[in-house]
Image (cartoon, rainbow, N blue to C red):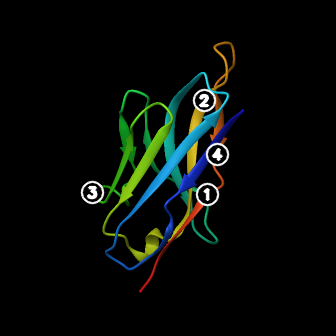
């Protein structure tokens, strides 16, 4: 099993910044793509940004130029969020495609989420 733990959420004023972290642990043979998703009240979960094991990134149009996704090794991932807007308010979830042994299929794993609130 793979566990994902997010941290770094909180309350920030419009125009402010936050940095989210995601740490993977457990029985990990390898991790492929990792990503950040968010879910606002009454809305479906949506993609924020993803990063491949090779460092290729994809962003939602709504966060391009403001958010930066990064990985410092195979297990740690970050989301630098600048110029935050009230519409960025949501629970942010870490996602990873991982397998526990070389014989396993790739599986999707999710963290428990961290709340980001942008308000004055």
Q: In this view, does 110 lie above or below 65?
A: above
| Residue neighbourhood size for the residue with mark 3, other residues' Cα within 10 Å, grouped as few (<14), some (14–19), many (≥20) | few
Among numbered discs 1 and 3, the one appearing first in the sequence: 3
Location of mark 3 (residue):
65
Location of mark 4 (residue):
110
Task: Tell me, for residue 113, which label it has, or none.
Answer: 1
Residue drawn 61% across the image and 57% down it: 113
| Residue neighbourhood size for the residue with mark 2, other residues' Cα within 10 Å, grouped as few (<14), some (14–19), many (≥20) | many
Which residue in the rendered view is the most extreme toward the right?
A: 1
Circles 1 and 3 in contact, beta carbons < 8 Å: no
The mark closer to the camera, 1 or 3, is: 1
Which residue in the rendered view is the most extreme toward the bottom?
A: 120
Residue drawn 36% across the image and 78% down it: 14
* Secondary element type, mark 1: loop
Side of 114 where 71 appears, left or right: left
Q: For the residues marked 2 and 4, what is the alpha-carbon distance in whole angstroms? A: 11 Å
Q: In this view, does 102 lie above or below 78?
A: above
Task: Tell me, for residue 98, which label it has, or none.
Answer: 2
Among numbered discs 1 and 2, the one appearing first in the sequence: 2
């Amino acid at each position: 099993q793979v566990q994902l733990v997010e941290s770094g959420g909180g309350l920030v004023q419009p125009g402010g910044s936050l940095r989210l972290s995601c740490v993977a642990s457990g029985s990990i043979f390898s991790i492929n793509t990792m990503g950040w998703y968010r879910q606002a009240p009454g809305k479906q979960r949506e993609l924020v940004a993803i990063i491949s094991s090779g460092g290729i990134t994809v962003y939602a149009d709504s966060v391009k130029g403001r958010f930066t996704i990064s990985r410092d090794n195979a297990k740690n991932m970050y989301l630098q969020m600048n110029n935050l807007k009230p519409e960025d308010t949501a629970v942010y979830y870490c996602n990873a495609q991982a397998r526990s042994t070389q014989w396993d299929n790739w599986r999707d794993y999710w963290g428990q989420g961290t709340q980001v609130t942008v308000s004055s």
